[in-house]
Amino acid sequence: MCARVVHLATPPLPRVVPADVFDAFGWCASDSLEWRVPVGPRYAWDSSTRIDGSDPARMVFVLRPGAAPFLPRELARLHAFGLGLADEEALAPWAIDDATDGLHAQGIRPADAMWAAADNLNALFWALHDWAHFHNHGPFEQRAWTELQCDVAALAWLWANRRALPLDEATWERARADVVELARGRFAGEGLPAGEALIILDADRLQVLAEPRTTRS
């Protein structure tokens, strides 16, 4: 079994939601996510999966040896295949909130604690979405707004890394449309107007966010 290892660029992005949604936005600056995907005839990157809100099959955060012992864990090979995993442990898939709280409380940089296994577009989207959660702590009392910030990050990071994945523009646009519908449903479920809020999910706005930022001297 062979794995392709890619360090996806996940630079910090600006806050696009109200200030009170997070209590520690950007408490740890994101820089990259180590992503591993199986290579071979039996396992291959699949960009055809839709982002429909279902559990992301074949995605898991594999914990680095000795890292964050307080996190709930399961055997990584139960969730990720084709990577030659044996006794490696992974963050339990139901424990994303535990990781968001625990890493923040302990001041542990997420990249020092874990890497992501994902072999399809839906799985990688949610890995990037959760990666944003890990770097931006909040009480999760305003779900629609909290998830919107992470949706924006995941889509922008997918666009920024599209050549490395690979991911063509049409497939990214299909994923973006799926995410817009999920976000619209969250706002409707909370009885909130979504019109102006979802403007940030326009393709051109996301692509601008994904552009490398330079600092003027």
Image (cartoon, grey):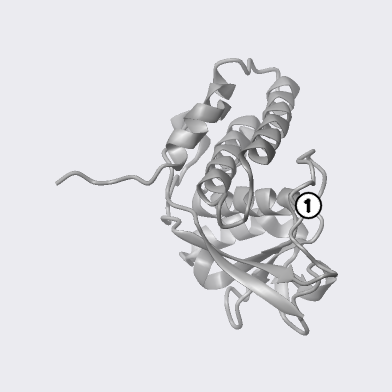
What x and y, as percent, mark residue 83? 74, 76
Quarter of the figure with residue 31: bottom left
Residue 39, compared with residue 200, is above or below; it is below
Residue 205, compared with residue 34, is above or below; it is above
- How would you rate the neighbour count of disc 1 (Cα within 10 Å): few for under 14, some for 14-19, many for 20 or more? many
Residue 39, compared with residue 32, is above or below; it is below
Q: Amino acid at mark 1?
A: Pro
Label 1 sits on residue: 56
Instruction: State the residue at coordinates (65%, 18%).
Output: 192
Quarter of the figure with residue 118: bottom right
In the image: residue 120, left or right of residue 138: right
Q: How many marks?
A: 1
- In the picture, the quarter occupied by the N terminus is bottom right
What x and y, as percent, mark residue 209? 44, 37
In the image: residue 97, left or right of residue 26: right
Q: Is residue 17 visible?
A: no
In the displayed image of the protein, which residue is found farthest to the left? 217
Disc 1 element = loop
**In front: 167, or 78?**
167
Q: Is residue 26 visible?
A: yes
What x and y, as percent, mark residue 142? 61, 32
Residue 23, compared with residue 196, is above or below; it is below
In the image: residue 140, left or right of residue 94: left
What x and y, as percent, mark residue 39? 73, 71
Instruction: State the residue at coordinates (76%, 41%).
Output: 51
Instruction: State the residue at coordinates (61%, 82%).
Output: 65
Instruction: State the residue at coordinates (56%, 71%).
Output: 113
Quarter of the figure with residue 72: bottom right
